[in-house]
Image (spheres, rainbow, N blue to C red):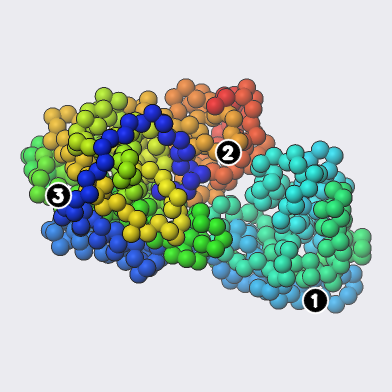
């Protein structure tokens, strides 16, 4: 399941609990527990996107289907996996003194979101922590254009900064201030004794200027009092900015070229043809993502100590993968009227990339898909208070209630999660106007941590969910008519509940990683975005006075918005610039 910031956070306390799930060791339970154990084993390396472990998982699942006579095919799409320095050179100079070369990787290093740049001599300027709040202003009296700007990376907790907005307290928020300042480069001062190692960072857009990591020690030959200036800010809350062009001229030369690496990640598709001569052209899709977090470099909730450890992802989502495999075995024997397509997606943890790719490059005609069932985290049903949460984005309420009525005795089904359940691969299908059903046994303390292990899986609970899922699937696959898409149950709130967001705009995000603007997959009915005329496929590049390169920039802009405020929005449609004014609404 994708990162908790995009995950629903509340579930109705009024959900009815049923009888405990019987602890039987059925063949289905035994098979699924075995598959979960294999998929979450150390040999699968956490199934991180772009890793050997995910490729091994796809190979294993494909062999399973083929061994049972089920036809498979694969898709592959590019995924950004790393960044390297192709060329990195830098030197410092002061006045007429001889230039001092810097050792790359020790004295200086690039950030993964850095832009490239080459220049021979640009003046240095110190701008405190890059903050402007109340009477405190690190930029007052400074000319930043064409300069190499130095700021402290780690913001101190001092009274002078107490009224900073949530956005301005983030590194991203501070760096965005420099996007329109026409600076030559930005240096982030580290508190340690060495530059920060280069690594990929998906949370920040790629900036147009170099962003460098250095220490005060590495800069002391040309800016010898940086430590003292930072100390004074922390102790007194007073501005200590300084333009070193007058002291005498302190400057930097730089050559930086970064290479970003892509690899291909797989979607695996298995097909069970329908038996009815007419209805077999219609399709019921079952989906589950097989990727997880690898070593937890991105999105781990286990803290600093967890990064580097394999995140097994037994529940998230080896459980859903194993359930789909089991359903494939059962449904092959059932010989439904409609065709059933089982889709194992990658890229879900990075924003539903695999399912979004499948929607754009479907392996069956997209108009033939009549419903989609998604299984994400279905392995941790509470044995004492058994309950399955089931949502239906784009599914008529009557159809969802009918599906719930098929539940076996002893299984309680939670209320419809509605728009709150838009945090997994079924969202991609709902955006394509396909009714969806979401199966989920709930969050737990091991979510996105190395402790999400196979020995914590409730196999008996999985077997009960699989029985229910088979009934729902066959009901859809054999029905005279399938549900029609209901836009009311597919509505999503803008921003998916971002902290601090008090206004709504009404766009449906494309969570794929883009750096040329905020790509949208649609708009909500009655929203400001709909009134403005935005459409699926549009790319927002400016929101109010703020440039927008990624979804995070857009969410930051909404965070500071006020209900009733008029904002100018600029976007691209098929490469053509467009502009309009929108009124923000209260959430």
Q: Position of residue 363 (x, y in %)?
A: 25, 49
Say whether disc 2 or disc 3 marks the residue closer to the N-terminus.
3
User: Pointer 2: residues within 10 angstroms few (<14), some, or many (20+)?
Assistant: few
The residue to which callout 2 is attached is: 499
Question: What quarter of the picture does the C terminus occupy?
Answer: top right
Residue at left 75%, top 67%?
Answer: 215
Q: Earlier in the sequence, mark 1 or mark 2?
A: 1
Q: Residue at x 65, y 73 (%)?
A: 105
Query: Which residue is at 59% across, 55% downward?
Result: 206
Left or right: residue 335 versus residue 349 is left
Q: How many numbered dots are placed on residues in this image?
A: 3
Looking at the rendering, which quadrant does residue 558 occupy?
Answer: top right
Q: Is residue 492 visible?
A: yes
Q: State the CA–CA distance, disc 1 to disc 2.
A: 46 Å
Q: Is residue 202 left or right of residue 354?
A: right
Q: Which residue is mark 1?
A: 100
Residue 330 has which mark? Answer: 3
Q: Quadrant of residue 521?
A: top left
């Amino acid at each position: 399941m994708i990162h908790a910031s995009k995950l629903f956070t509340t579930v109705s306390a009024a959900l009815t609990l049923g009888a405990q799930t019987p602890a039987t060791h059925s063949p289905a339970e035994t098979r699924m527990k075995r598959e979960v154990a294999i998929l979450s084993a150390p040999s699968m390396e956490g199934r991180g996107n772009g890793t050997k472990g995910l490729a091994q998982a796809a190979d294993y699942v494909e062999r399973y289907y083929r061994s049972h006579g089920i036809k498979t095919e694969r898709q592959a799409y590019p995924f950004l996996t790393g960044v390297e320095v192709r060329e990195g050179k830098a030197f410092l100079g002061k006045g007429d003194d001889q230039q001092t070369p810097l050792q790359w990787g020790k004295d200086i290093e690039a950030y993964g979101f850095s832009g490239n740049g080459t220049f021979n001599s640009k003046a240095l300027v110190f701008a405190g922590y890059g903050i402007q709040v109340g009477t405190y202003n690190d930029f007052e009296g400074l000319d930043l254009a064409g300069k190499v700007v130095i700021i402290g990376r780690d913001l101190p907790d001092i009274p002078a900064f107490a009224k900073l907005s949530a956005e301005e307290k983030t590194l991203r928020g501070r760096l965005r201030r420099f996007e329109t300042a026409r600076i030559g480069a930005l240096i982030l001062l580290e508190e340690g004794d060495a530059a920060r190692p280069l690594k990929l960072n998906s949370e920040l857009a790629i900036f147009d200027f170099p962003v460098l990591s250095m220490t005060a020690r590495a800069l002391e030959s040309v800016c010898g009092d940086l430590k003292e200036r930072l100390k004074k800010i922390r102790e007194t809350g007073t501005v200590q900015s300084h333009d070193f062009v007058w002291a005498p001229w302190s400057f930097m030369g730089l050559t930086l070229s970064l290479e970003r690496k892509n690899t291909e990640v797989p979607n695996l598709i298995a097909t069970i043809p329908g038996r009815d001569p007419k209805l077999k052209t219609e399709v019921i899709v079952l989906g589950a993502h097989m990727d997880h977090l690898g070593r937890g470099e991105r999105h781990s909730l286990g803290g600093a100590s967890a990064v580097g450890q394999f995140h097994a992802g037994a529940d998230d989502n080896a459980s859903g993968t194993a359930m789909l495999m089991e359903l494939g075995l059962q449904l092959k024997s059932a010989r439904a009227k409609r065709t059933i397509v089982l889709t194992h997606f990658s890229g879900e943890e990075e924003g539903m990339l695999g399912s979004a790719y499948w929607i754009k490059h479907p392996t069956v005609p997209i108009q033939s898909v009549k419903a989609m069932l998604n299984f994400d985290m279905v392995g941790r049903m509470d044995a004492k208070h058994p309950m399955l949460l089931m949502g239906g984005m784009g599914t008529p309420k009557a159809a969802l209630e009918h599906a719930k009525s098929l539940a076996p005795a002893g299984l309680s089904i939670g209320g419809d999660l509605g728009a709150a359940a838009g945090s997994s691969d079924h969202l991609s299908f709902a955006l394509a106007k396909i009714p969806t059903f979401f199966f989920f046994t709930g969050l737990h303390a091991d979510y996105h941590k190395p402790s999400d292990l196979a020995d914590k899986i409730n196999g008996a609970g999985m077997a009960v969910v699989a029985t229910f899922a088979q009934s729902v699937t066959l009901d859809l696959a054999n029905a005279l008519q399938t549900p029609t898409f209901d836009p009311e149950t597919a509505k999503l709130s803008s921003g998916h509940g971002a902290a601090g967001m008090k206004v709504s705009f009404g766009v449906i995000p494309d969570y794929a990683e883009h750096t040329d603007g905020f790509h949208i997959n649609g708009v909500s009915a009655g929203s400001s975005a709909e009134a403005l005329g935005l459409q699926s496929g549009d790319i927002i590049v400016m929101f109010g006075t703020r440039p927008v390169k990624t979804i995070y920039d857009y969410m930051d802009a909404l965070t500071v918005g006020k209900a009733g405020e008029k904002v100018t929005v600029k976007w691209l449609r098929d490469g053509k610039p467009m502009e309009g004014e929108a009124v923000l609404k209260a959430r």
